Image (cartoon, rainbow, N blue to C red):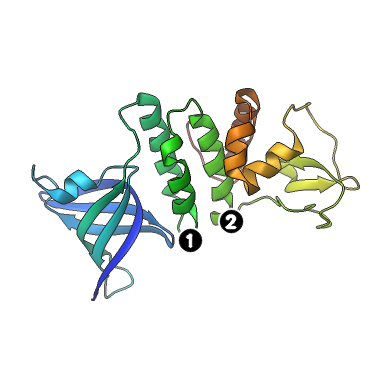
Amino acid sequence: MAEKITQGICLFYQQTGENEFIVHFLFDTGLKSFFAQGLTKPLSKNRSNLISGSICEIEYFGSRLNDKIGRLKKSNLIKLPNIENFANKKTITRLIELFYNVKSKNDLIILYNDFIEKLGHCKNAVILSIFLARSTIFLAIAPNFKSCTVCHKSNQIVQFDLTQGGFLCYEHQVAVKFKSSVTIQEWFLLFNEPLKYFEVISKSNNIEILNLLLAFYRDNGYYFNW
């Protein structure tokens, strides 16, 4: 097979033999894994460039068979998050856990590139909310975050409820079980303008949103022990 070059997020690698490894990446086409050798060698350039949570450019040989994996030739480090901070390392670990579920085409690498340098600014929980929200699209569990989930009208939106499928208009709003301080505008920004959401959301409102998102994921079969 011809050699290919692409960029992705390095998730992690697993040792499968004395000098054999499987390396997992998230690309814009979804999760992809490659066979690699020599990562135990102290002077291995691939080993030093394959850091969990980093953005890499990789050269690889694709597999001739659909049920086989390709072979990693070379990796080059493009951008590395600050993982010396314990909170950052914990956040990266959680994002990797999320990314490992994404098997379809996605724009998570673009979003990740926007936020990788914002880690450690006391808003790591906000970043988790942003990626949980965006990933619903690529896991086929996304709520309607553009219009009323019942009638699909975009005017007179008065409510957002994950358990009801997203935005609801005045006519189709439902009774609330508890009063929330999170505004419709904040939900809209989360799904549609994440950079602005990052700037304006309060810590308390984001924690409420994060917990609601994690519960929503559990309801859809994804369990994250965060």
At 45% from the left edge and 58% from the top edge, which residue is drawn? 103
Q: Give the CA distance from mark 1 to mark 2.
A: 9 Å
Residue of label 2 = 140
Q: Is residue 16 visible?
A: no
Q: Secondary structure at mark 1?
A: loop
Q: Earlier in the sequence, mark 1 or mark 2?
A: 1
Residue 92 is marked as none
Taking 5 as reference, is 171 above or below it?
Answer: above
At 33% from the left edge and 63% from the top edge, which residue is drawn? 6
At 24% from the left edge and 47% from the top edge, which residue is drawn? 50
- The reply to whether dot 1 and dot 2 touch (C-beta < 8 Å) is yes
Residue 104 is marked as 1
Taking 40 as reference, is 3 above or below it?
Answer: below
Q: Is residue 13 visible?
A: yes
Measuring from the top left, give residue 187's x and y in whole percent: 69, 40
The reply, left or right, for residue 195 in relation to residue 174 is: left
Which three-letter amino acid code belongs to the residue tagged 1? Ser
At 11% from the left edge and 48% from the top edge, which residue is drawn? 44
Measuring from the top left, give residue 114's x and y in whole percent: 47, 45
Measuring from the top left, give residue 41's x and y in whole percent: 8, 45
Question: The N terminus appears in which quarter of the rendering?
Answer: bottom left
Q: Secondary structure at mark 2?
A: loop
Quadrant of the image occupied by residue 133: top right
